[in-house]
């Protein structure tokens, strides 16, 4: 147990920017205040809350990515619509200019 405690003190966790030792101390305080019988219920509640937050952030990220894709495809369609008349004019102009190209040679 002592080794685990010292390991937790030395190990830096990325959870909320707290080290392992700080997490152990917080867990001990929660154990003292709420007792061992209510710890599983508290852990389940915290787990569910963290899962809901994670799901919500994933939904927001997905919505943002979908809107970016929609915007990019809309811009692509607009560019195609703008290029179309110029591409349509290119062939008649090249047909008209063919006789003049032969004059230079």
Image: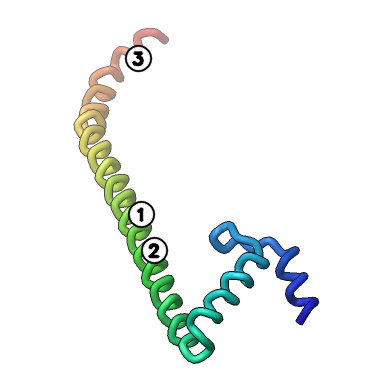
Q: Residue at x 76, y 82 (%)?
A: 1
Q: Which mark is residue 58?
A: 2
Instruction: Check the picture and name the quadrant holding the C terminus.
Output: top left
Q: Is residue 58 above or below residue 65?
A: below
Q: Residues within 10 Å of mark 1 (few under 14, many from 20)?
A: few
Residue shown at 44%/86% (left/top)? 41
Residue 101's label in the rendered image is 3
Q: What's the distance in space between the residues labelled 2 and 1, CA to CA?
A: 10 Å
Look at the numbered discs 1 and 3 and tell me whether their residues touch, using CB distance below 8 Å: no
Q: Secondary structure at mark 2?
A: helix
Residue 27 in the image: above or below residue 65: below
Numbered-mark total: 3
Query: 101 above or below 74?
Result: above
Earlier residue among tags 1 and 3 = 1
Q: Secondary structure at mark 1?
A: helix
Question: Which quarter of the figure has residue 57?
Answer: bottom left
Report crowding for label 2: few under 14, some 14 to 19, many 20 or more residues within 10 A (C-alpha): few
Query: 90 or 53, which lies in front?
Result: 53
The residue lying toward the viewer, choosing from 38 and 45, is 38
Q: Residue furthest front?
A: 33
Residue labelled with disc 1? 65
């Amino acid at each position: 147990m002592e080794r685990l405690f010292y390991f937790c003190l030395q190990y830096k966790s990325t959870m909320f920017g707290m080290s392992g030792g700080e997490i152990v101390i917080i867990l001990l305080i929660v154990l003292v205040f709420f007792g061992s019988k209510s710890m599983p219920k508290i852990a389940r509640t915290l787990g569910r809350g963290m899962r809901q937050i994670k799901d919500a952030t994933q939904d927001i990220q997905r919505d943002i990515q979908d809107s970016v894709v929609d915007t990019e495809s809309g811009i692509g369609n607009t560019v195609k619509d703008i290029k179309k008349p110029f591409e349509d004019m290119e062939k008649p102009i090249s047909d008209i200019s063919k006789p003049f190209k032969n004059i230079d040679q």
